[in-house]
Amino acid sequence: MDIRKVDDRFAVAPQVQAEDMQALADAGYTDVMCNRPDGEEPGQPPLDELKAAAEAAGLTFHHVPVSGGHFPEEALEEFARIRREADGPLLAYCRSGTRCMTMETISNPMGLSVDERLTRAAEAGYDLSSLRFYLSKGDAS
C-alpha cells in the first residue's frame, strides 16, 4: 500500500484491497473512507467486499463518493464531518489518492490557512497549487 500520511490522524492512499484492511487496523487506523463510486472502473474491488473486510478488521467504514472532478458541497461537508469525528486515525482512499487529498484541502476540516493546506498536500506528494485562487476566496491568507 502507498499510504501518504498527512498528519497523525489522517492519511490518503490509492485503491486498497480487502486483504489490506487487517494491516490498516494493525497499523493503528480506526476508520477507512472510500471516495470512489462503487464500480467506477473495471477491476475495482466491490464496495460491499471492502466494507465487510474493514468491519471484520474492526475498522469503521465510510463511503463518500465523488467523481469527475466535481465535489458537491454535501460530499465535502460529510467528508469534513467524518474526518473530525473519526475515533482515531483515518485512511481515505480513491483511485490515486488525489481525490481524497483534494477533498481534505477544499473541505478544510481542521480550519487551516490556504498555505498550510497546500503545503500539507505537497508534502504528501499532491500538487494542488492550482486550487489556490479557489481556496483563497474569502480567506485572508
Image (cartoon, rainbow, N blue to C red):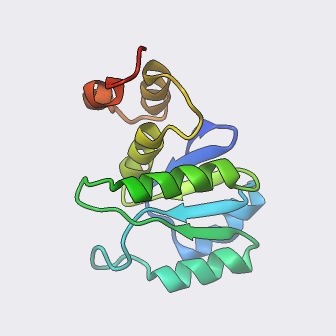
At 54% from the left and 27% from the top, the residue drawn is 112
At 42% from the left and 47% from the top, the residue drawn is 103
View extreme (front): residue: 138
* 73 horizontally vs 55: left or right: left
Residue 43 point in image, percent of width and height: 33, 79
How many discs mark residues in the rendered view?
A: 0
At 63% from the left and 79% from the top, the residue drawn is 53
Residue 61 point in image, percent of width and height: 62, 70
* 12 horizontally vs 57: left or right: left
View extreme (top): residue: 141
Residue 107 point in image, percent of width and height: 46, 43
Q: Residue 98, relative to residue 141: is it above or below?
A: below
* 51 horizontally vs 99: left or right: right
Residue 111 point in image, percent of width and height: 56, 31
Q: Nearer the viewer, residue 17 or 65?
A: 65
Q: Quadrant of residue 105?
A: top left
Work out which quarter of the rendered image holds the C terminus and state it: top left
Q: Quadrant of residue 86?
A: bottom right
- Asked whether the viewer can see residue 91, the reply is yes
- Asked whether the viewer can see residue 2, the reply is no
Q: Residue 23, relative to residue 123: is it above or below?
A: below
Q: Residue 4, relative to residue 94: is it above or below?
A: above
